Image: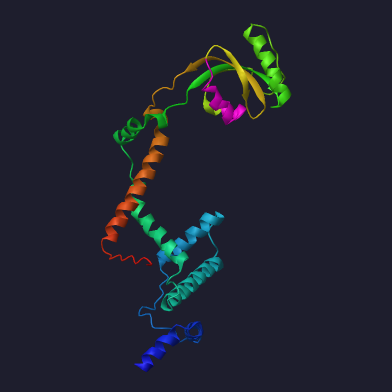
């Protein structure tokens, strides 16, 4: 009993852990590695084909004989170290290895979903479930007068110029590399020229009336919305790629979850929380 207690106490000591690890490494380097059972490393046509294929993808040419020999030698070196590392248990409790193996398993789980082509009915059902997601942006026709940078002085100037515009007088504004009028413009067009804040404000402005100042990435503007067209219902022919991308993402997530649940049934998970 005393011997067992002493052994347990020694095994908890960091120095003992270090000595054990050192002994294992010494055994590896001295050629006395643990028996792995299967110690044959076979370099067949499939292996060489994969090595040559990866080389071609990287350099857009086939490797020379010497380069091929080098690729094979490096692959054999990988296999030797990989198997010896497994024999020493170096993969145990390694978070990087765990995460990489998890990603490989998840890749296998979604392989079928990624190769399947969804039917038009499946894609249309996704559009019908969330039409706003795939609808085209509302389009707007508007005029704008550029007043310059967003400063207190220009905001005061905006009030005076706005009063003139509402009376029907002409206001020229400052020259700028932006159109004074845009017809049937979508959100992407207006955001590209004026910025996202300006585009969001356009959706709130009244129709048929000069309003402002409205801020943009360039500064201040006075704006008159002439017409705002409601977004058209999405059509599969126009948004197919977006819907299919969403379908694939959803199918992959579903396949991963289902595969995990099937595997999980074979494990007894015990969670012991600290008291």
Q: Quadrant of residue 188?
A: top right
Left or right, 217 with respect to 140, comes to right
Res 178 visible: no
Outermost residue, front direction? Answer: 275
Residue 261: which quarter of the image?
bottom left
Q: Relative to 97, is 114 above or below?
A: above
Give the image location of residue 7, x and y in percent.
40, 89
Quadrant where the N terminus is found in the figure: bottom left
Residue 158, above or below 52: above
Q: Where is the C terminus found, in terms of image quarters?
A: bottom left
Tell me which residue sits at (44%, 79%) in the image.
88
Residue 200 forms part of the magenta stretch = yes
Q: Nearer the viewer, residue 104 or 265?
A: 265
How far from the left and from the top, in percent, is residue 269?
30, 65
Instruction: Provide residue 263's location: percent of width, then percent of height.
Output: 29, 60
Label the magenta part by its dominant secondary structure.
helix
Viewer can see residue 2: yes
Nearer to us in this view, 80 or 4:
4
Magenta stretch holds residue 151: no
| Residue 34 vs residue 266, the one in the foreground | 266
Q: Which residues are magenta?
A: 190-206
The spot of residue 173 in percent (x, y) is 70, 16
Above or below, 93 against 119 in this view is: below
């Amino acid at each position: 009993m005393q011997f067992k207690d002493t052994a347990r106490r020694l095994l908890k000591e960091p120095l003992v852990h270090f000595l054990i690890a050192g002994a294992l490494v010494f055994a590896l380097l001295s050629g006395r590695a643990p028996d792995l059972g299967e110690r044959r490393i076979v370099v067949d046509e499939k292996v060489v084909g994969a090595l040559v294929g990866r080389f071609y993808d990287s350099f857009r040419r086939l490797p020379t004989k010497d380069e091929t020999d080098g690729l094979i030698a490096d692959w054999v070196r990988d296999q030797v170290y990989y198997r010896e590392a497994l024999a020493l248990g170096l993969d145990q409790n390694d978070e990087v290895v765990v995460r990489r193996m998890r990603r490989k398993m998840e890749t296998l789980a979604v392989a079928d979903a990624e190769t399947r082509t969804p039917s038009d009915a499946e894609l249309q059902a996704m559009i019908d479930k969330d039409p706003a997601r795939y609808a085209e942006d509302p389009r707007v026709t508007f005029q704008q007068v550029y007043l310059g940078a967003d400063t207190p002085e220009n905001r005061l100037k905006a009030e005076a110029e706005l009063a003139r515009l509402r009376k029907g007088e002409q206001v020229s504004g400052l020259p700028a590399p932006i159109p004074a009028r845009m017809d049937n413009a979508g959100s992407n067009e207006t955001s590209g020229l004026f910025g996202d804040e300006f585009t969001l404000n356009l959706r709130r402005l009244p129709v048929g009336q000069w309003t402002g100042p409205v801020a943009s990435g360039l500064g201040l503007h006075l704006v008159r919305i002439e017409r705002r067209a409601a977004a058209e219902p999405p059509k599969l022919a126009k948004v197919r790629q977006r819907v299919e991308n969403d379908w694939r993402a959803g199918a992959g997530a579903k396949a991963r979850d289902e595969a995990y649940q099937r595997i999980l049934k074979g494990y007894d998970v015990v969670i012991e929380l600290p008291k």
